[in-house]
Image: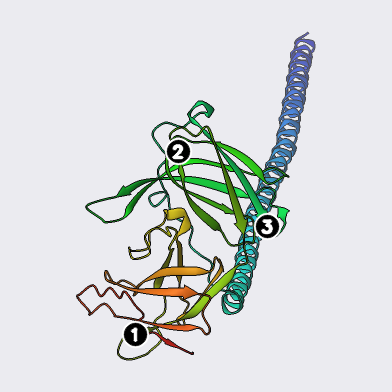
Amino acid sequence: MGEQAGKGSSASSEECGNQDSLLLVKTSGSDSSMYEDGEGQDRDAGQGRPREARDSLKVVELTRHLSRAWVLGVVAAAVALALYGRAVERAARQVGVRDLTEAAASAREAPVAPVVPTDEARTLPVGEAASEADGVLELRVTEGERPASRAQVRLYRRRGRSPETGRVEWRVAAAGATGNDGRLLMPARPGNYLVVARTEGSAPTWLNLIHPLNGNRTPVHLRLGGATSFSGRTVAQGTGKALPKAELTLTPYVNSWEQEARADAPAEERVTVTSDARGHFRVERLAPGLYTVEGRAPGGPFTVEWNIRVPTDEPRVLALPDGAVRARMPQRAPSKELRCGM
């Protein structure tokens, strides 16, 4: 019995040992599976992290490419604008040089154009315009034997000479253009008038008239004649050197009733020219007759005056004092420095 008890105890101990080993094996298996699951998660996490990194790198590279492309686009646009600006500037310079060349050529070949009176020099209008009830001028303008259609006619009212300046005070009374028949009606009050007519490309013609107090209608006939010119050059008085940019003003004797008086005319009927770089000047479309030529050196405040009848046989040489001369030198007749020939 003792042996059986010993065997039983040993058997039970072996069974306990076997159970312990089974428990150990099961526990070990559980731990190993747990560890295996942890390693798998680590591998999956390891595989996920490189994928996100690769995506981030792709975004960075794409951003860099876009930045480079934007910078290149900006640079290209700036270069294109610079080239376009240079091309425009070059073209403008070429046009400017061509214009200057053409202007120089035309200045050498063509006469100096007369200066149009400025607003300050224009003749003022009368205070109140006349009506047909005040009287009418029946104007007829002819060129040769034919009526001058579309002739420009201007009527000036003479108001006497100013005691301060000694010049006639003029006022514009009316202005208009003739019809195809060369006729024009102009309302005018009684008084002393100067009427001037001209056509494009022709010399002006003028006539002094008196519209009577009781005259309802006064017939006026203006005949356009041939045009002439006046040319020459300006020189420095004493030296005879060419005097460029000298200003010359030609005033016609429009009043045949005052031949001894100084020539006077409205501002629109005076002609002003400037001599070129060699002192040459030329005035076209002048009416034949007597003129007062008033010359002024460039920058000089003093003038010289001559009485000249055009047309002249030859170009004239007009001598003007330079800025050093401090006295006004009026010349009622051509001076010794005024000579024929160039």
Amino acid on which disc 1 is placed: Ala
Q: Name the residue under label 3.
A: 143
Near mark 2 (Cα within 10 A), the count class, few <14, some 14-19 or many ≥20, is some
Name the N-terminal-most of marks 1 and 3. Answer: 3
Q: What residue sits 65% from the left and 65% below the top?
A: 87
Q: Mark 1 points at which residue?
A: 236
Q: Quadrant of residue 323?
A: bottom left
- Whether residue 187 is situated above or below residue 328 in the rendered picture: above
Q: Residues within 10 Å of mark 1 (few under 14, many from 20)?
A: some
Q: Earlier in the sequence, mark 2 or mark 1?
A: 2
Badge 2 amino acid: Pro
**Which secondary structure lies at badge 2?**
loop
Under circle 1, the secondary element is strand
Is 150 placed left or right of 275 in the picture?
right
Q: Going by the picture, which residue comes out furthest to the top?
A: 1
From the image, state whether disc 1 or disc 3 is nearer to you: 3
Q: Which of marks 2 and 1 is in front?
A: 2
- Which residue is pictured at 73% across the width and 30% down the height? 41
Q: Which of marks 2 and 3 is nearer the N terminus?
A: 3
Instruction: Give the distance between the C-alpha atoms of the residues marked 1 and 3, in whole angstroms.
Output: 42 Å
Q: Label 3 neighbourhood size at 10 Å, few (<14), some (14-19), many (20+)?
A: some
Image coords of residue 5 (percent x, y)? 76, 10
Q: Which residue corresponds to the image point at 74% horizontal and 19% vertical from the top-left?
A: 23
The residue under label 2 is: 212
Q: Are marks 2 and 1 in contact (CB under 8 Å)?
A: no
Q: In this view, does 318 lie to the left or right of 165?
A: right
Point out residue 165 in the picture as x, y percentages from the top left corner.
25, 55
